[in-house]
Image (spheres, helix red, strand yellow):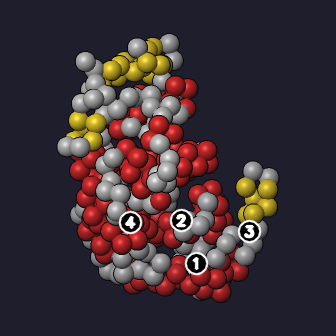
Amino acid sequence: MSQVASVHVGAARVLIELPAPSEEAMPGVTWGLVDAFPTPAYWVYQVMARRFCGSVIRSRLGANLIEEVAACILGGHGIPGRVGVAAFNHLKLCGLFSRPSSETELYAQLLEPLNIDGRSVRYRFARQKSKYLVAALRILYEEAAVPISSGRELRDWLLRLPGAGFKTASWIARNYLDADDVAILDVHVLRAGRTAGFFSPELTVERDYLALETQFLKFSRAVEVRPSELDAVIWYEMASSPATIRRLNRSQSPSAPRSDVRRSHARQVCSID
């Protein structure tokens, strides 16, 4: 028996039919209830609902590869998403990506307060990120040809850039090429995947990135959604809800019952028939 969820698009009501909760999405991973966060069914519904509502998460941040590299290096690793984007937009407005810029110039501008919703915010790690940026952009300006035939090829090439590990290099490649052969994995996606059951619990992003990426891509194929959409939706929902993070932290402690993560805010975004 299948389960059906609905999406309201204006005056229309679109029905999304998913396999029964007890059916396996892939060996060892059941679909689960569509309104029970964070089951495979829940994530597939969120991806499909955004498609129907025209609210697919826009990934690309820059107008070209140099800007995309800069935007992604400025984000992540303890930098809130809005702060990273604000810093990127500030440096772009200063014209520092239209020509080779010095570390001194980049550092001076990263020290400037950023205006985010009327609040003055300081950018963390200005010295470190200015060093990474000037070195990475110098390589890009000097490189005659960057491989862009696939996301993985570009990601592997980007690993040579200072400040670009697997996560950042995958993020750049996914954004720039809209690629589905890499995954952007961080603690948010890792927690969600462990709870849903498609990540092996003993693997970590720091030690086992490529093994986790393989598991993520395999899961995406099994539930028939694009990896680029799936990891963007998971990251956005997880990063937007501190309560969700606390709930998953409790659920993944040895003493916490699995039921702690049942019934999240899914009912607020879908109706179940």
The residue that disc 2 covers is 76
**Marks 4 and 3, how far apart at CA:** 31 Å
Which of the pair 136/75 is nearer the observer?
75
Q: What is the x, y in percent for residue 176? A: 39, 59
Q: Earlier in the sequence, mark 3 or mark 1?
A: 3
**Marks 1 and 4, how far apart at CA:** 25 Å
Residue name at image x 34 percent, y 62 percent: 202
The residue that disc 1 covers is 129
Q: Which of marks 1 and 4 is nearer the N terminus?
A: 1
Q: Which mark is residue 122?
A: 3
Q: Earlier in the sequence, mark 2 or mark 4?
A: 2
Q: What residue type is labelled 2?
A: Gly
Q: What is the x, y in percent for residue 75? A: 55, 65
Q: Which amino acid does label 3 sit on?
A: Arg
Which of the pair 21/103 is nearer the observer?
21
Image-quadrant location for residue 186? bottom left
**Marks 2 and 4, how far apart at CA:** 17 Å
**Marks 3 and 2, how far apart at CA:** 15 Å
Q: SS of the residue at dot 2?
A: loop
